[in-house]
Image (tube, rainbow, N blue to C red):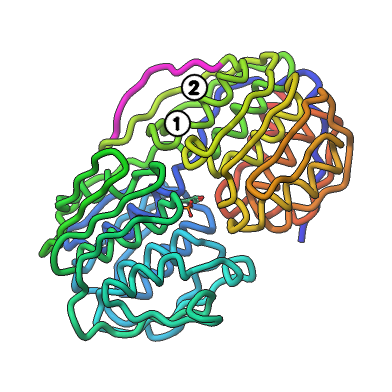
Amino acid sequence: MTTKSIQAAVTGLHGEITVPGDKSISHRSIMFAGLCTSPVHITNFLHAQDCMSTVTCMKALGVDIVETTNGDMSVCGKGLHGLREATSVIDAGNSGTTLRLMMGILSGQKFLTTFTGDSSLSKRPMDRVIKPLAKMGAHIVGRRGNTLLPITVIPQTNKLIGLEYEMPMASAQVKSAILLAGLYAKGTTTITEPYPSRNHTEKMLSAFGADINSSGNNIKINPIQELTAPQHIEVPGDISSAAYWFVAGSIIKNSDILIKNVGINETRTGIIDVLKKMGANIEILNLRRTGGEPFADVRVKSAKLHGIDIKATIIPRLIDEIPVIVVAAILADGITTISGAQELRVKESDRIKTVYNEFSKLSTNITEKKDGFIIKGNGSLKYAECNSHNDHRIAMSLAIAGAAGSGINIDKAECVDISYPEFYKTLHNLTNK
Ligand code: S3P
């Protein structure tokens, strides 16, 4: 386990950077390409541990995936019905997206698959996916009443049946698992979400020729014989990774950063909306599109932020950015409240508890709520020895707090490899420009 020391960035952050490929889109590109029969070339794929869990999983199920010398991925899929049984247990590592989406794909297959994962994934609830899939006729068993890993998807003997499902929470992972099972089901599958969550599955399945339609909070999918792959998928830069620089560039005095090729899908841009409402100086430049996904260059300059109320409706559009929003709120003028974010309790760590415990070492003005936080901005962050609890988004948020404040020591710092292996190097480069 590595400890990382971050120094205060006293002269500001400067420079032009790119962020690695979007994690959600990278997972889906490998999975969906694996379900086609024509080859797909993927550029700007995220080479981080989470997405490599999906690569390992699809390879174990017979899909040919080759990494080219420049890091692109070349996938030769097996078709919707051509995956083959893995000969051993599949390790989904730390990746909830791998496990939950794969359960949707595998619930329509005629062979058995068993999953395991790391200690964090083994504590996360899987019944939110298993229950609706069971209603479609899938047979999935797991520890503690079909809730926890290890999980086995039993071979399917009858065809799945379409489902009308009102989701109890806004979750793109749950929605995607049901939609993927819907590809194999008899009849239409209809999902209603309480608030719209990220829609990369809908967009990409549509680009793969699926019979899928969205309207407001409703999504409908019909079964299909085969998907048809686009020859090329370009993954936009991950806005969840760019978010660290949006916040750092805003709160660290004398900063000016240009982040190139950032995905700005409307279901992910809650972080930009919130920071702008707090007074941030963020400009969207050079807007363009790749495979149905919009992306742009984003320029961030330092600004004085003020506290705001962040309510349930926007939470799914910024769920992974809340730890770093807390850093912005600590340095903002006035009070910031975050409500309706109870989903944070079932992420890679209980992010309400971890944020409260670790950020309270840096600032005394955070109150933990059942579904979020109250943060009294006090404009200062002390030096402290903190722990990431092996949660990549906590490690990166702590690092930004250290750079914006008085430095920090982070224990279990290497977990950034889950989504952003170059994170510390990028922070170092921006600090020393
Ligand atoms: C993801 C969806 C979100 C997010 C996760 C990635 C996805 O989880 O937190 O990092 O790729 O679908 P939930 O859908 O469970 O909210």
> Would you say 133 lies left or right of 213 here?
right
Identify the image quadrant of the N terminus. bottom right
Q: Residue at x 44, y 36 (%)?
A: 268
The image quarter in which residue 215 lies: top left
Image location of residue 299, percent across then percent down: 53, 18
- Which element carries disc 1, helix, strand or loop? strand
Image location of residue 60, percent across then percent down: 38, 75
The crowd level at tag 1 (other Cα within 10 Å; few <14, some 14-19, many 20+) is many
**Cβ atoms under marks 2 and 1 closer than 8 Å:** yes
Kindly report the secondary structure that dominates the magenta region of the rendered protein: strand
Badge 1 amino acid: Val
**Is 234 drawn above or below residue 54 in the view shown?**
above
Residue 387 or 127: which is nearer the viewer?
127
Residue 289 or 356: which is nearer the viewer?
356
Mark 1 sits on what residue?
Answer: 262
Q: Which residue appears farthest toward the left when viewing the image?
A: 225
Please report the bounds of the magenta region as a residue range. Answer: 282-290
The image quarter in which residue 216 lies: top left
**Residue 298 bears which disc, if any?**
2
Badge 2 amino acid: Val
The image quarter in which residue 253 lies: top right
